[in-house]
Image (spheres, rainbow, N blue to C red):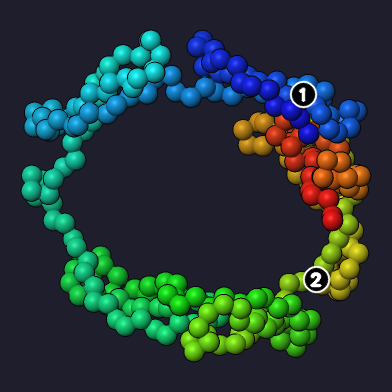
Amino acid sequence: MYDKQAWSECDVETNTRQREMVLVQGDATQCLPKKIVTKKCRKACRFIKGEWSPCNTTSGMKERTLTPKPGSAEQCEATVQSRKCQKLAETTGAKVNKCKYNFGELSPCDVRTNTMTQMMTLKSGDPNVCIRQKKLTRKCKIACKFRRGEWSECDEKTELTTRVDTLVKGDKRECEPTREMTKKCRLACKYTYGDWGDCDMKTNTRTRVKTLVKGDPEKCKSEENVSKPCTKRDGEQRCFFGSWGDFGPCTNGVMTKQRPLLQGGIECERKAVITKACES
């Protein structure tokens, strides 16, 4: 955990500003005692946008004046912005196709999803362009809120799991006292992961092994290599971490646990620490 100092004034040449971060909590062998964070300044020039002029039929352009807002940098000057005019249907002869619909009645509220549906049928418009029928979905005006139950064990025959939710808020005349939710079971393959290896300079990847600790050996692979590129598409280093440690003692009402950072910058350092409130 770092103490964040105040931001410096903006450097006009680089359009950046900096601040220093000083370590106040964490393992000094794993965390930098001090680090400098740099980011771009807000735009030095901010403008009040004037109204667009009428379209110049000769050039097909329109203009407006941009006036520097109070507090902008001294080098900011008023300027004129130009843009092509939008072609109007009246001048180009283009036909504007409008799709108009008749709206059907709203369906009763589905308490499972708390939604209502409504069908739209094409009233006028080119059927080659307009969708003939559309289905709208919206939330019910009457909110039926449920407390979620626990998912059941997976039914091996149907490969489904079920839970029963209980009504906690809503009009009992409109809301069912319970609702049953069903979904497909997830394949219960649980793995433990080894440490990341060094970056292979030939393939630009790191590899680690995941080993099956729970699940059907006929459906789950007992062991598998997992690989990730060492860098992102833009060439920036990817974050790689070691295993999480345990939460430390309660200090100032919070507990912290860390994992070693194997590769990555400041953004990765933030993901290497978790802090939570102490249990009462």
Q: Residue 247 in the image: x percent, y percent?
A: 89, 47
Q: CA distance from mark 2 to mark 1?
A: 44 Å
**Quarter of the figure that contains the N terminus:** top right
Tell which of 61 and 228 is nearer to you. 61
In the image: residue 173, left or right of residue 96 = right
**Residue type highlighted by circle 1:** Val
Residue at the disc numbered 1: 22
User: Which class describes the residues within 10 Å of circle 1: few (<14), some (14-19), or many (20+)?
Assistant: some
Q: Residue 6 in the image: x percent, y percent?
A: 64, 21
Residue at the disc numbered 2: 188
On residue 49, which mark appears?
A: none
Q: Residue 216 in the image: x percent, y percent?
A: 86, 74
Task: Check disc 2 and report its element: helix, strand or loop.
Answer: loop
**Residue type highlighted by circle 2:** Ala
Residue at (76, 85) in percent of width and height: 155
Above or below residue 94? Residue 201 is above
Above or below residue 213? Residue 64 is above
Above or below residue 216? Residue 159 is below
**Quarter of the figure that contains the C terminus:** bottom right
In the image: residue 149, left or right of residue 129 = right
Residue 220 appears in the figure: yes
Tell which of 60 and 207 is nearer to you. 60
The tag earlier along the polypeptide, 2 or 1, is 1
